[in-house]
Amino acid sequence: MKNHVLRPLWVAIAFVALILLARYVMVPRDFGVQGDSFTFNFHRAGNVDEWKNMPAVAYLGGETCVECHDEQGAALEDSPHVIIQCENCHGPGRDHPETENPATMTIDRSRGLCLRCHADLGYENSSRADLPGINPEEHNIDTQCVQCHNPHTAEFKEDA
Amino acid sequence: MSCSRRTLLKNTVKGAIVASLPISAFRLLSPAELKAAIGDEKVRWGFVVDTTKCVGCGFCVKACKKENEIPYDAPITRTWVERYVVTRDEKVHADSPMGARDGFTSARIDEETMESGGEHTAEIEPAEIAKAFFVPKLCNQCEKPACVQVCPVGATYQTADGVVLIDRTWCIGCGYCVMACPYGVRFFHPKYKVADKCNFCYHRISKGLKTACVQACPFGARQIGNLRDPDDPVTQTIMNERVSVLKDEYGTKPQVFYLGLDYTVK
Amino acid sequence: MVDPLTIAHGAEWTVKHGFVYPNEFIYWGLTIVMYPYMTGLVAGAFVLSSLYHVFGQKDLKDIAKFALVFSLALLPVAMMPLMLHLQQPLRGIEVMFTPHFTSAIAAFGMVFTTYSIIVLSEIWFVYRQYFVEQTRALKGSTDTGDQIKRVIYNVLTLGAYDISEEAVAKDHKAVTILAGIGIPVACFLHGYAGFIFGSVKANALWMSPLMPVIFIMSAVVSGIALCMLTYIIIMEWKKFRAVLRKGLGDESVTVIAGVEMDVMKKTSRYLIGFLIAAITLELLDIIFRGYTSMKSWDILREVMFEEDFTKIFILQYGLGNVLPFILLMLPKMTIRRLFVALCLILFGVFMMRWNVVIGGQAFSLSFSGFMNYDLPIIPHNLETYREGLFGALTVAATPFIIFWLINKIVPSMKEV
């Protein structure tokens, strides 16, 4: 009988070979070091392009909005609110107006939205103090800001 | 062949830099400049946060969550804004309720993250406030990312233009990268069950758009730019202003630079 | 019904107070406490068995074979908590496919496989003669159970039927060599579990070059303790059966009790040695952190001496180290006292793992907030089962089930 001592070794080698085979089948071909560094650039190459297209752009930017909504664009022109993106209040414009119902764009008219900037926190040395601020617990509680203030021009509404 | 030529060129440039050291030692060469000189990539993304401009409106957080499809009501977020209130007795109060997704609309330090009971109090008298400010945070896209180093399977990595990405089809969800990040920017995505974090809106910047947070910020507190382009406003700011980075003691070399950072910022 | 998309992983068992970054939660819960604990038991059990096979510590002969088989039973369990913990358990095998060796976890697959092969081979050499004998003895039996058994034994011989004196001598030599290689590999397997934590520079509590060594020492302590404990239980059972069969005063009862006490006294000497080493290193670590007082010391001190004081100083050091140490050092050892001491040691090592894994996440990266771990007890979804008490109990119970199964084929308690 031949030397039996090496038998477990053959089993081990067979096991490793099995893993290597599985590795060959299951690891994508483009997996490897994609730059100079094994530490930082070891990955599946195809993933970079996947991220370039994922997810679909949701926030289109104000320039796109005013292409159609020129009236609102004009209202904003001389307004201090011109620095605020339309989509900050109106929600992301993805699929608008391609979807059948453009009215689905949700307009946030809550007090909370305006208070993001206009709640007076009393932080004198912060640029928050440069903005007009109110005390939300005293200033016309239970009333929507837009009842008196025009959100685009940032002026008082004439009919209010 | 082109590869070896590139290597040759690179070595030549490197050699030239080393040779010119005695002269350039008198001139401060910023890391960005140095990298622009030796790197062969045309783009290297960098970010500038001007904390003096931030008012804590949180529009950046809202835009980021919606743009990148991070479950809106989950407490995790790719970017967030912190509020710091330093009182006259030099106590530091800080909070970031829901990552400031809805901004800071109350002077109360958030009860949820700031349980009173210890020495911290939720309500601070305005007269007690010495200084207060807001600090937006996001992934630092470190040059030496600790999170990438510890990924056991090569599911997270640094792209040639310097952004750290996560392969959602390959991440095993061990959480080691979450542990390794000194900035706490990583979390598990509730839907995909893999690690997730800010990637500078890679799908936007690759198309020539600004990141969602940069676009949403009304005050220009956030800027993204190409560190390889010396004329880029971001590069200009980093080169000409006194900028700092977060937690440089970890040696991760962050690529997000801050203006007006206070020593109390965690 | 809560929308599962609004639940962040970790939010269900993390209670924050102070200033904590929004994405911070206790991501590594009880399963990750179990992982170094179980690997520690594996390594410890193997080292114990090797002390006999390699260094010829004759006093450990009786427990050595048992320890070896027990370390095999623990082996799959070392991997189990890791698999339970993964968010994508089915992708776990990628660690073998695309190992990123700059990560401490990447080597796990390789080290673990190597170690498994060594343990399996060693057991094969120890029991080969028995396999061959069984194959021959069961030949011709018509009983279905026996036939299945015979097939299993036949496969296990790997076709090596030679049990001449010469061949068996070769087996013994192979066992010695394998056990010799096995010790560094076992230490590596566990030391590197310590490295996984010790190398995380973002975590102020974990980052320490002492971490791997501390882990090895406490691993050996817990491994030996568990082997002794299981040995006591099995011997007591034997004694109990002997008493039932032959009456209290029978000679065989005294013989069993004598053997038991003898083995335990000898083994506990090793246990005390490793226990001293483990405690010394842990104390050194704390003293060093306090003396150097780096930026993180303020929050670490608060965690150690205020938030987690009970867990660290009372449960781990007091109940888990000092008390059993005294119990072991007192003269006139009895099995009952030893049993209590061993349970306390196992508990102490478990608390040490807890205080490292959970304690390392008890404070925020901001150094100005804390996170409390609210252990999920009654699971209400998969996540709270996996990371909760019942997941851990599953993990803790498995080695005993496996040991029982293995013993059907490879009897570790009988004289072969």
Image: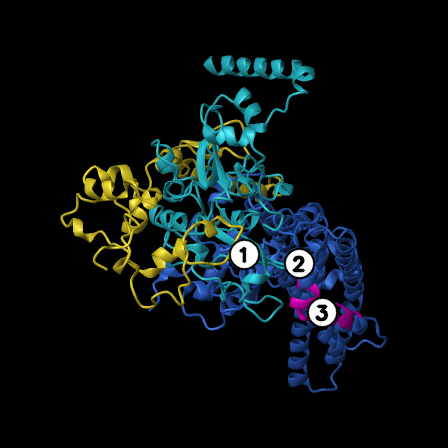
Chain colours: A yellow, B cyan, C blue
Residue topped by disc 3 = C320
Residue at position x 44%, y 44% from top?
B198
Residue picked out by circle 1? C76
**Given this view, does label 3 or label 2 mark the residue nearer the observer?**
2
The secondary element bearing badge 2 is classed as helix
Residue type at tag 3: Gly
What span is colored magenta in the figure? C303-325
Q: Which residue is mark 2?
A: C299
**Residue B243 included in the magenta stretch of the image:** no
Q: Earlier in the sequence, mark 2 or mark 1?
A: 1
Mark 2: amino acid: Ile
Give the secondary structure at mark 3: helix
Image point 49% across, 43% down: which residue? B139
- Residue at mark 1: chain: C
Crowd tier of the residue under label 1, counting other residues whose Cα lies within 10 Å: few below 14, some 14–19, many 20 or above: some
Chain under callout 2: C
Q: Could you tell me the amino acid type at mark 1?
A: Pro
- Label the magenta part by its dominant secondary structure: helix
Instruction: Indicate the position of residue B131 as horizontal and vertical percent values.
Output: 57, 53
In which quadrant of the rendered image does the N terminus of chain C lie? bottom left
Q: Position of residue A144 (x, y in %)?
A: 29, 62
Left or right: A5, with C280 as reference point: left
Q: What x and y, as percent, mark residue C91? A: 43, 48
Provide the secondary structure element on which disc 1 rests: helix
Calculate the distance from the C-alpha at mark 2 to the C-alpha at mark 1.
37 Å
Front position among marks 2 and 1? 2
Closer to the camera: disc 1 or disc 3?
Answer: 3
